[in-house]
Image (cartoon, rainbow, N blue to C red):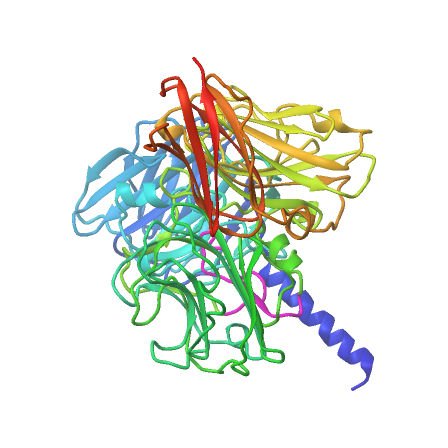
């Protein structure tokens, strides 16, 4: 075979990978309402349901009043007395089995607005129920009304009655009668999984993962074929008002064996080298396995875990990589933390990373990693208790990633479009409603063990399940073209305002700026975010009242060229990008060099309004690549605590401090006789320059001392409060 044949085969393999593995965000079916415009699947035994069932989808109709009857989902041969149908009757959700309408709801769904509709039938109780936006909208009890077996195809937007006109998304068919709480739990998920807590799902058309010319169905392969002028529409980066963006994996510490199981393949079986990565959020201090392969006995190839003392630990071939104490460092609880580890069998060099910072480098050779037929697991193992927390963006690579690749990949939801090394065999589990790998098509995972012990996160409706700070905007070179930084700065009632700086050393004349922001917060409508350049020019990119009901969290890129502006009914965490409240063009013509600052303020302090600036980044002139100077330079060479200013003060003062390397930092305030009156900081800090606001409104006038403890560094300074 000549070299041109080899090249052709290589290109063909890459094309197949790209076609099957790419994750398309925010797409929907579009139907004109004309006869002959619909989608259709092949017939299949899983769709020929003769017992309990649930039909559901999101719809955005053009005109529910005309025509009066509009088919949404139908499995029925012509006008025959078989199958099941969900349709709109003058805008009300209706359910039909065989040839008889069993129930019509009472709510007329609005035109031009996304609404979730569902219809269920329970064979045991003979009860039909329809739901609108997760709330029951009518019930009926009818005996002998089970659907008869049907050999025809399943159609969407067409059938025995008039076609449907509008957009449709997240279309699902279940062979069980789901409850109201079940529907509420999953209606905002881009769901494509049928194991564990989602058992009973027989078909799901998400419109997000597509092959050319067809709608992939990820459960049983019932591809939805377009007919007439029916099409897929790219909603662009418009902020979604109904679906969760950036879901993760919630683990509840359930019984042993409750985890995600990924069948063995070459992609999860690296031998010569390995890179392990993930985001972790946990409040638990017990030992917890996050990523593993192999049995609980010794000699398993790899395992990434959090020990009972909260240390970040990796075990290869059954050997602990401890280094000079504390392994990869202490994992802080109650916050998102990015963990990464690399190892080369050729050199024995290993590196621990926490939040993009190298926390330990050493040499410890265990040779090539053991090649086993065991499954890979996430969130536990075959005989280990499940992780108690949230995990996201789990990756295993068969090569050693560079420091820059670790940093640039921290905030990116990875697929074939942004894989930094397409030939390097990385598997990436994004948990966007599925357990599929979107880089190299490793065999998709399954939920194992207790069905109630592990599931996808509810980042839209549940304020306790926080999203990781991940963004998916491949077209804008995120994050390769950005200077990015992990911040971890809590704010809320105290302090109200936090700020973080990024040092830009390259000199450019600015013609465009994009700003990535990752904030978790109970009510995004109360956040003000401002970008300040080295010359103190500012642009307020988000302000309170920009729109009512922004929702929770804010993980997006502010871009003047985005296709949507903050406003209307759009809810956070929005989308990969959005227009800022005020244009960033105020910086055009200025120079990039110096410290750029993001200032975040909580305008309405309260308990549920507390938030955290997890990370942020900035891109100039739509550049495709940039360095990681904020991780490799501009880092203090020593610890230091500075004198507060102003001093004396009333009642707020600023305290600055420098952290030379990652460690736990505690800053306390004591009165004149040595009693501790307040703890200002008590958490792990990455290297950097910090400042905090100390509000002494609750204290009496007098002399106070503030003390810093950072590893072995301890210092104390005096301040005077004068009221």
Q: Tell me if residue 434 is in the magenta stretch.
A: yes
What's the magenta bit mostly, secondary-structure-wise?
loop
Residue appearing at x 65%, y 49% in the figure: 479
User: Which quadrant is home to the N terminus?
Assistant: bottom right
The residue lying toward the viewer, choosing from 65 and 437, is 437
Q: Tell me if residue 115 is in the magenta stretch.
A: no
User: Which quadrant is home to the C terminus?
Assistant: top left
**Quick one: which residue is furthest to the bottom in this view?**
1
Q: Is residue 248 above or below residue 697?
A: below
* Image position, residue 375 (x, y; %): 42, 74
Q: Is residue 668 left or right of residue 348?
A: left
* Image position, residue 236 (x, y; %): 62, 40
* Image position, residue 530 (x, y; %): 61, 27
Residue appearing at x 83%, y 35% in the figure: 509
**Quick one: which residue is furthest to the top in this view?**
723
Residue appearing at x 51%, y 29% in the figure: 570
Asked if one can make out residue 36 in the rendered structure from this viewpoint, the answer is no
* Image position, residue 523 (x, y; %): 43, 29
Q: Is residue 220 above or below residue 519?
A: below
Q: Is residue 283 left or right of residue 338?
A: left
Magenta span: 422-442
| Picture quadrant where residue 486 is located | top right
Asked if one can make out residue 17 in the rendered structure from this viewpoint, the answer is yes
| Picture quadrant where residue 666 is located | top left
The residue lying toward the viewer, choosing from 215 and 19, is 19
The residue lying toward the viewer, choosing from 599 and 250, is 599
How many marks overall?
A: 0
Q: Is residue 506 left or right of residue 413?
A: right
Q: Is residue 211 above or below residue 464?
A: below
């Amino acid at each position: 075979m000549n070299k041109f044949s080899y090249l052709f085969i290589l290109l063909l393999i890459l094309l197949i990978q790209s076609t099957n593995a790419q994750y398309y965000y925010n797409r929907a079916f579009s139907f004109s309402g004309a006869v002959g415009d619909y989608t259709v699947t092949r017939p299949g035994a899983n769709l020929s349901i003769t017992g309990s069932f649930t039909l559901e989808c999101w719809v955005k109709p053009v005109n529910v009043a005309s025509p009066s009857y509009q088919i949404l989902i139908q499995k029925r041969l012509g006008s025959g007395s078989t199958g099941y149908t969900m349709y709109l009757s003058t805008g009300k959700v209706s359910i039909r089995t065989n040839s008889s309408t069993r129930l019509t709801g009472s709510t007329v769904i609005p035109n031009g607005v996304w609404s979730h509709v569902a219809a269920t039938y329970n064979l045991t109780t003979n009860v039909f129920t329809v739901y609108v936006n997760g709330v029951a909208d009518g019930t009926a009890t009818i005996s002998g009304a089970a659907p008869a077996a049907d050999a025809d195809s399943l159609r969407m937007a067409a059938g025995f009655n008039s076609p449907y006109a509008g957009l449709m998304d997240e279309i699902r068919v279940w062979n069980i009668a789901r409850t109201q709480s079940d529907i509420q739990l999953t209606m905002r998920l881009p769901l494509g999984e049928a194991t564990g807590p989602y058992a009973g799902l027989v078909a799901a058309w998400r419109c997000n993962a597509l092959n050319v010319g067809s709608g992939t169905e990820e459960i049983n392969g019932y591809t939805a074929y377009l007919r007439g002028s029916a099409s897929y529409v790219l909603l662009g980066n418009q902020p979604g008002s109904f679906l969760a963006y950036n879901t993760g994996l919630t683990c509840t510490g359930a019984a042993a064996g409750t985890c995600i199981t990924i069948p063995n393949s070459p992609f999860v079986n690296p031998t010569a080298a390995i890179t392990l990565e993930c985001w972790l959020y946990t409040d638990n201090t017990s030992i917890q396995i996050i990523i593993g392969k192999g049995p609980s006995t010794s000699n398993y190839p790899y395992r990434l875990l959090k020990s009972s003392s909260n240390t970040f630990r990796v075990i290869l071939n059954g050997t602990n990589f401890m280094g000079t104490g504390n392994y990869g460092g202490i994992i802080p609880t109650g916050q998102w933390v990015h963990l990464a580890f690399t190892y080369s069998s050729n050199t024995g060099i290993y590196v621990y990373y926490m939040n993009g910072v190298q926390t330990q480098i050493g040499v410890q050779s265990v040779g090539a990693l053991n090649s086993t037929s065991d499954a890979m697991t996430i969130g536990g193992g075959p005989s280990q208790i499940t992780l108690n927390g949230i995990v996201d963006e789990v990756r295993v690579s068969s090569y050693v990633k560079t420091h820059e690749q670790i940093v640039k990949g921290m905030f990116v939801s990875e697929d074939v479009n942004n894989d930094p090394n397409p030939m390097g065999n990385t598997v990436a589990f994004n948990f966007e409603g599925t357990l599929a790998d979107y880089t190299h098509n490793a065999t998709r995972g399954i939920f194992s063990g207790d069905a109630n012990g592990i599931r996808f996160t509810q980042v839209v409706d549940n304020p306790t399940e926080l999203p990781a700070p991940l963004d998916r905007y491949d077209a804008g070179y995120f994050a390769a073209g950005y200077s990015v930084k992990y911040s971890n700065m809590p704010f809320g009632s105290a302090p109200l305002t936090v700020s973080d700086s990024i040092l830009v050393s390259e000199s450019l004349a600015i013609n465009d700026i994009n700003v990535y922001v990752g904030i978790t917060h109970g009510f995004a409508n109360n956040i003000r975010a401002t970008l300040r350049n080295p010359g103190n020019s500012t642009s307020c990119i988000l302000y309170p009242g920009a729109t009512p009901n922004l929702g929770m969290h804010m993980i997006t890129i502010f871009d003047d060229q985005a296709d949507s502006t903050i406003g209307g009914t759009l809810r956070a965490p929005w989308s990969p990008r959005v227009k800022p409240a005020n244009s960033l063009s105020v910086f055009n013509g200025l120079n990039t060099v110096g410290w750029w600052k993001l200032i975040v303020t909580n305008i309405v302090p309260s308990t549920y309004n507390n938030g955290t600036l997890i990370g942020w980044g900035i891109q100039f002139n739509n550049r495709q690549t940039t360095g990681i100077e904020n991780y490799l330079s501009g880092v203090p060479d020593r610890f230091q605590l500075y004198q507060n200013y102003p001093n004396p003060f009333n009642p707020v003062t600023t305290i600055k401090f420098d952290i030379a390397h990652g460690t736990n930092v505690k800053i306390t305030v004591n009165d004149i006789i040595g009693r501790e009156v307040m703890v200002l900081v008590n958490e792990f800090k990455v290297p950097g320059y910090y400042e905090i606001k100390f509000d002494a409104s609750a204290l009496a006038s007098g002399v106070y001392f503030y003390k810093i403890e950072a590893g072995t560094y301890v210092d104390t300074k005096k301040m005077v409060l004068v009221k």
